Amino acid sequence: MNKKYTILSLMFVFLFCAGLSQGQPDNNTSTIEDDAITAEIPVPLASEAALQDESAEVNETADANATQVNLGPNLNYIWSFSGIEAGPITMALNQEGIELYGQAKYEPDGGKPWNANVDGSVTGNEVELTMTAQKDNELITTKMIGTYANDTINGNFTQISGGKKVGSGTFSAMWINPDTSSYTPAVIEEPKVETPAPAVVDTPADSNASGKETAETEKASRFVDIHEYADKIQTGVGDISGIPI
């Protein structure tokens, strides 16, 4: 009996050890597969994530600055331009993006005022304006190209009329009022046209009246009032030769 139990005990030990040796590779294989799956999912470090966020913010700021540079400055003001005429030209500019449009006027002391239409554009700090005015029955176009800096515009201008260049030079402008709605055009007086006086025309009635008066006058002159000479006729004294027959 003791030998029998001893043999059975040895068989259980052998079987137990054999089972452990067979199950061990399965556990190792599972561990290796888990490690491989974990390695396929990259986990960024905290410092790398922070660098990516900072880079995105820098790019957004750069894009915003670039957009602002492309749009250029705000020129939505009433301006005073000098150098083009003997006196200042007042110009009201409206701005939509890079487009500029508005009106201008010139009101000299003792001279003829005029009004003009204006259009143009602004790219960065470069400003281009075209002013078209009616002066003494002539259409004059003034082309201005300048640079905006420190609330002023400075540049060169060229004037064209009838397909010919009639003037050129430099100009300077500074804004004087931010409220463009307060701009009013110059008052242009219409030329006065003198109406000639109507000619005097004699009507048939006037002619007949004049002829009748002349006939009556001639008729009256043919008769003499003898009472004026009664003393000479009755007395027979005096010279009666002057009495009309």
Image (tube, rainbow, N blue to C red):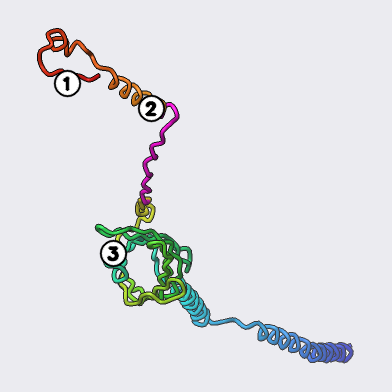
x and y, in percent, of residue 125 in the image: 39, 75
Residue 123 location, quadrant: bottom left
Q: Residue at x 43, y 64 (%)?
A: 118
In the rendered structure, find residue 211 and report the number of the disc placed on it.
Answer: 2
Residue 189 vertical position relative to residue 209 in the rendered view, above or below: below
Residue type, mark 2 in image:
Gly
Q: Residue at x 40, y 66 (%)?
A: 74
x and y, in percent, of residue 86 in the image: 27, 67
In the rendered structure, find residue 168 and report the number of the disc placed on it.
Answer: none
Q: Secondary structure at mark 2?
A: helix
Residue labelled with disc 3: 88
Furthest residue toward front = 236
Would you say residue 164 sits in the magenta stretch?
no
Q: Secondary structure at mark 3?
A: loop
Residue 90 seen from this side: yes
Labels 3, 2: front one: 2
Q: Earlier in the sequence, mark 1 or mark 2?
A: 2
Residue type, mark 3 in image:
Pro
Residue labelled with disc 1: 241
Residue 147 location, quadrant: bottom left
Judge by depth and name the residue closer to the eye, 186 or 15: 186
Q: Residue at x 75, y 85 (%)?
A: 30
Residue 230 vertical position relative to residue 198 in the rendered view, above or below: above
- What are the residue bounds of the magenta stretch? 191-207
Residue 13 vertical position relative to residue 69 in the rendered view, above or below: below
